[in-house]
Amino acid sequence: AVASSDYDHAHSEELEITAVDADLQGVSVTPALRYQHYGAIETYSGRSIDMRSEVGLLTRNVLIRGDDSSAVTQHGAHVMFSSKGDNSLTGRISNVECYLCGQAFSLGRYPFHFHMIGEVIGSYVKNCSVHDTFNRGVTMHGVHYLHVKHNVVRNTMGHSIFIEDGIETQNVIENNLVMNTIASAELLKTDTAPASFWSTNPSNYWVNNAAAGSERYGFWFQTPEHPDGPSATTLVCPRGMPLGEFSGNRAHSNGRYGLRIFNQYMPRTHPCEDFVLHDNQTDSPNPLLPTTLEAFTSYKNGRSAVLAPMIADVRFSNFRVADNQRSGIEVSEVQAPAGHAETRDALIVGHSGNQDLPLDDDMNDSSGGGIGFWAPQDENYTLVDTVFANFDHEGLTALSECSHCNFPNTQNHGAHRVQLSGNTFVNVTSKVRWGGVEPGYGIIEDVDGSLTGFGAGTFLAATWPHMNIPGLCHDNYTEFPDTTVCRADLASDLNEVKIRRLTFNNDWYYSNLYVRRAGGQTRSTVPMIYQIRNPTNGWTVGAVVQQTYSIWWSYGIPSYMYVEVALLGPGEYIYLSFAISEYYDHYRVFPRFGSNQSQEIQPSPFLPVTNATSGTQYMERSGDSDGSGTVTVLLAGTNPALYSQRFVIQAYRCPRAGCPPPPTSPPSPPSPPP
């Protein structure tokens, strides 16, 4: 059988070899091929992606098969090993063909099935062929140390190579070829969206396997909180367990994803204990485990080569992806400190020699489409030493951000930072397209200048008028449309061009937020976005540090407001000057940690200096008859920079006991620090 090399998994073809050339360099087959099967290795900037169609031998001298009615009844042969206790049996199957095997509608009746034994050291399924089956291919259920190697699996209903409950560990799945995995409505719910390789426990080994076409997924890691089924226990926690190995695998021609890590994978020292995201993991009582997936190749997938909705310190190294209709590599949420979760040494190709031009409409779908790397809706992700090639047609772009921010169950305001360094762009006319919620939000730090050529430490963000700063930050670069670029090569101090995330939150105040930089000529109008996470019911925007911003709402300042700033580091500061009215006598600012509110930060009788306590506020009346004025709040950086600083600004009205009259004139401010 020859695997598909396009977007349709069903374009795998079964052929009969009728002759072999004398020089062993060619064969004759029947019938003639109906579809094109690509056979090239392409190289871009010294990195190669192998997109040659796989070929697998289906016949064996030893045959286990269903009878002539099996194709109609979906009731075929099955082989099952079951015994109680570790190593209570040894099962070895090699060079066997299993045809018309498995029994639909019957759990446990799989072509090859190792069932609830425990350790099976010395057992294996090797060099076999499993094809045209009705209930999966090879199933590992409640077993450890089984070897599944050098097998060809084709035209199977449901998950093809299947690790079942989540208790299974130390199994080796190596050098297997799976083609044309088909949905089944007769098994588990997940079998209606099948994967060629399905696993519920990461502590196994996947090496040099090929998932060459499935209705939905190539590799699907579904890591539950605890095992279920007959193996159910709360003492094992797959979601936090270490990875055995994932290297040298490939996936293509899948209806959705080549590799799906769903819905979260958080490997940590103590898998069953909670962990708290620390900015410095060395002081965590439950440190995250650095986990690397290596040398994965994936192309021609209906959505993405890689999707990781939520990961911790998980790293993608040496990936090769091409021709994916939605995105190449997509990470949605990250629970790890800076410098840990990353994609490194990848090759991401917008369109290869195996892609017809002009591009299909599917390459520009409603989610954005044709994105090379889709950055997360969280801070602290890094993209390093990656080559982007052939993003030069309408609908294709090398980079976007805020993955899944516009999906109903994962909506997020965005404006989180992603860090890039050492990246190369070959034949790329569109480097950045802002995604997420309209009107686009996002922040990119060009750590070494390789994205922009404007110097190490340049920042980019979706365009907002309040971020334009003469001589530093502009939105008129044709190479980066709809983008404000703050150039490090124009700055005397790199803090002048850093952009940080600001959020404002009030659960019932439905109004636009207006932002103007002090000295700026135009304001930004930031819509209130309702029922979207982080924050829920609020406003999000980027802000260049070392600046003062006037903040106001259509209906005046709310009586209380949550304000949050992300990753404000040493020497960085932002002043927020809120317009106030005569309704309120004074304001208080409280730091907030999670759901806990701390003691009030004492106000200052003058504008606080930049190294004062973050959250210090100064109120000043204008002297007009309407009692208007401003409350200016200092947001000051910390060392190290915190993932977020969050404050509650609360308004109070007089009269009330102990309410002091405002001072007639503020005292002189102290001298600035040396």
Image (spheres, grey):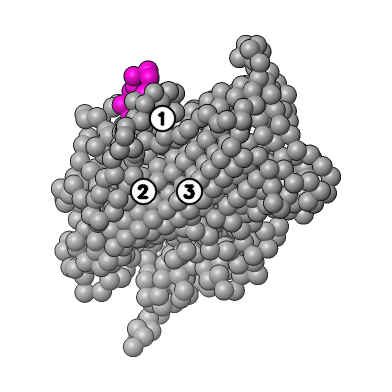
Q: SS of the residue at dot 1?
A: loop
Q: Is residue 642 left or right of residue 70?
A: left
Count of labels shown? 3
Task: Tell which tag, 3 or 2, sits nearer the viewer.
Answer: 3
Secondary structure that dominates the magenta span: loop
The residue identified by callout 2 is 320
Q: Kindly identify the residue that appears in the image at 67 percent across and 34 percent down.
A: 112
Any part of residue 157 in sight: no
User: How packed is label 1: few (under 14 Cα within 10 Å), some, or many (20 or more)?
Assistant: some
The residue identified by callout 3 is 208
Task: Tell which tag, 2 or 1, sits nearer the viewer.
Answer: 1
Residues in magenta, as a range: 29-37
Q: Quadrant of residue 289?
A: bottom right
Q: Quadrant of the C terminus?
A: bottom left
Give the residue type at disc 2.
Answer: Arg
Q: Are marks 2 and 1 in contact (CB under 8 Å)?
A: no
Q: Nearer the viewer, residue 633 or 169?
A: 169
The residue identified by callout 1 is 2
Q: CA distance from mark 1 to mark 3?
A: 18 Å
Q: Quadrant of residue 595?
A: bottom right
Q: Quadrant of the N terminus?
A: top left
Q: For the view shown, which residue lies furthest in the bottom direction?
A: 674
Q: Kindly identify the residue that appears in the image at 61 percent across and 14 percent down.
A: 71
Residue 300 appears at what percent x and percent y? Answer: 37, 35
Residue 32 within the segment the image draws in magenta: yes
Give the residue type at disc 3.
Answer: Asn
Q: CA distance from mark 3 to mark 2?
A: 14 Å
Q: Kindly identify the residue that appears in the image at 37 percent across and 65 percent down.
A: 575
Q: Nearer the viewer, residue 625 or 516?
A: 516
Q: Is residue 649 left or right of residue 345?
A: right
Give the residue type at disc 1.
Answer: Val
